[in-house]
Amino acid sequence: MKVASWVATTLLASASLVVAHGEPDLKHEHAGDVFHYFRGGQCYDEGVINNGTPVGMTEQINGDIFGNALVNNRLLADSLARAGYFVVMPDLFRGDPVPADALSGGSPGFNITTWRARHPQSQIEEVIQSAISTTRGQFGASRVGAVGYCFGGKYVARFLAPGRGLDAGFTAHPSATTADEWRAIAGPISIAFGDLDNSNTADNRTNIESIFQGGNKTYQTTLYANAEHGFAVRTNLTDRKKAFAQESAYFQAVRWFDAWMKDQI
């Protein structure tokens, strides 16, 4: 097991309109799968799993439940663990996530505005801070990196600021992250963008990269073809471009953190 831990904030929710990003529209996400195969590179075992039962444990620590209801998220956490990392996935919404079938119209009574009001930023950050403290304290991690999808991307950026507790980060299709939050990051960051993501337009991506360049940040950005918002967690795997984008985003995260662990970035 590698020395560092990952706090896997793998979430499929959106937040309020901000300067650096637009608002992701849930209808543009795909209620699809996580891939279960990969091409090349035996050092990461079998890549992401999308079949079977998640094997991670759910525990209550310091009042916070470590886990997530969406099967895809738990399987991604298992896959990161199989790559050699100790993975903690905090339940940022305390048992009240966006319904998994919200993307397909299966929850007609669900209201995203009301849901957001139940989960203010201060509450989310309490959970993340507890997870980081527990990962360093109880689990003895000397370095902590974070993976965040969509909603989680904002908090990867926020907790990469000096003194907030993270050392490195990866995010795919981040949402609701402000220019000031990107400017404040101190650790290395890797971002996976999709060219169909309306919350990460070409102008948005250019602005983010300009911020990183102007601040002399250590960063990596990758743009995937035919990839919609949410592609790294759920997408249409019958589309070869989408499947390639999802698979590649996973390996982008693993290789980024492996390089970080070797002090190459």
Image (cartoon, grey):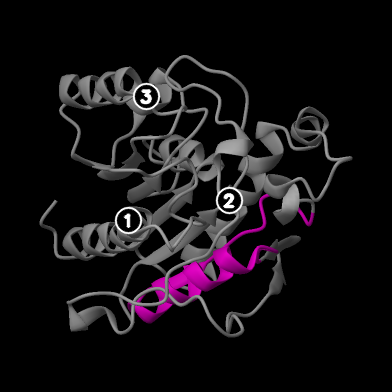
Estimate the x, y position of residue 52 in percent, counting from the top left: 58, 85
Does the magenta run of residues contain 81? yes
Choose mark 3 or mark 2, whichever is in front. 3
Q: Is residue 76 above or below residue 150?
A: below
Seen at 50% across and 75% down, the residue is 50
Find the magenta span and give its range.
67-95
Q: Who is closer to the viewer here, 177 or 105?
A: 105
Q: Is residue 60 above or below residue 214?
A: below
Estimate the x, y position of residue 128 in percent, counting from the top left: 58, 49
Choose mark 2 or mark 1, whichever is in front. 1
Seen at 20% across and 83% down, the residue is 42
Inter-mark Cα distance, 2 to 1: 15 Å
Q: Quadrant of residue 125?
A: top right
Inter-mark Cα distance, 3 to 2: 20 Å
At label 3, the amino acid type is: Thr
Residue 93 seen anywhere in this rendered image of the structure? no
Crowd tier of the residue under label 2, counting other residues whose Cα lies within 10 Å: few below 14, some 14–19, many 20 or above:
many
Residue 206 seen anywhere in this rendered image of the structure? yes
Q: Which element carries disc 2, helix, strand or loop?
A: loop
**10 sits to left or right of 238:** right
Seen at 89% across and 40% down, the residue is 109
